[in-house]
Image (cartoon, rainbow, N blue to C red):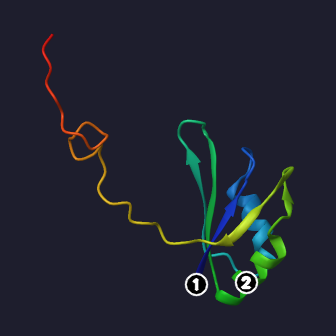
Amino acid sequence: MKNIFVGNLSFGATEDAVRSLFEQYGAVDRVSIVTDRIQAGPRDSVRRNVGRREAERAINSLNGQELDGRNLTINEARPKEDRGGGGFGGGRGGNGAPRQNKRW
């Protein structure tokens, strides 16, 4: 199985609409649209599990195709990168410099 990333979705895009678009290239295992909490709309991604051949056909056929007035960007989803630990510089003030307590 492959995951496909679909970018440049319109704010009105639904999982059903995306599923219908891709089902012409084979069975769709799962469609999920990740929403942006701040903008309250799609965050330009859909992950869709499909077989390898179907994925290649869908990517080649649908990349650049218009859906709801926007040209889709479709490619194989890449695994999430490990960005290391979170936080702001390990407690050093965010820029890597040690904190300095100043009294005025």
> What's the distance in space between the residues labelled 1 and 2, CA to CA?
11 Å
Q: Position of residue 4 (x, y in %)?
A: 64, 72
Secondary structure category for the residue under label 2: helix
Q: Position of residue 83 (x, y in %)?
A: 38, 60
The label nearer to you, 1 versus 2, is 2
Q: Is residue 50 above or below residue 66?
A: below
**Type of residue at label 1?**
Met
Q: Which mark is residue 56?
A: 2
Q: Is residue 61 above or below residue 33?
A: below
For marks 1 and 2, the one nearer the N-term is: 1
Q: Where does label 1 land, which residue? A: 1
Secondary structure category for the residue under label 1: loop
Looking at the picture, tell me which residue is in the foreground, 34 or 24. Answer: 34
Quarter of the image holding residue 11?
top right
Q: Position of residue 76 (x, y in %)?
A: 64, 75
Q: Which mark is residue 74?
A: none
Looking at the picture, tell me which residue is in the foreground, 22 or 87. Answer: 87
Residue found 81% across the figure and 71% down from its top: 62
Quarter of the image holding residue 27?
bottom right
**Type of residue at label 2?**
Glu
The quadrant the C terminus occupies is top left
Task: Residue lying at the far top in this picture: please name it.
Answer: 104
Quarter of the image holding residue 49?
bottom right
Looking at the picture, tell me which residue is in the foreground, 23 or 82. Answer: 82
Q: Position of residue 85 (x, y in %)?
A: 29, 56
* Residues at marks 1 and 2 touching, judged by CB atoms closer than 8 Å: no
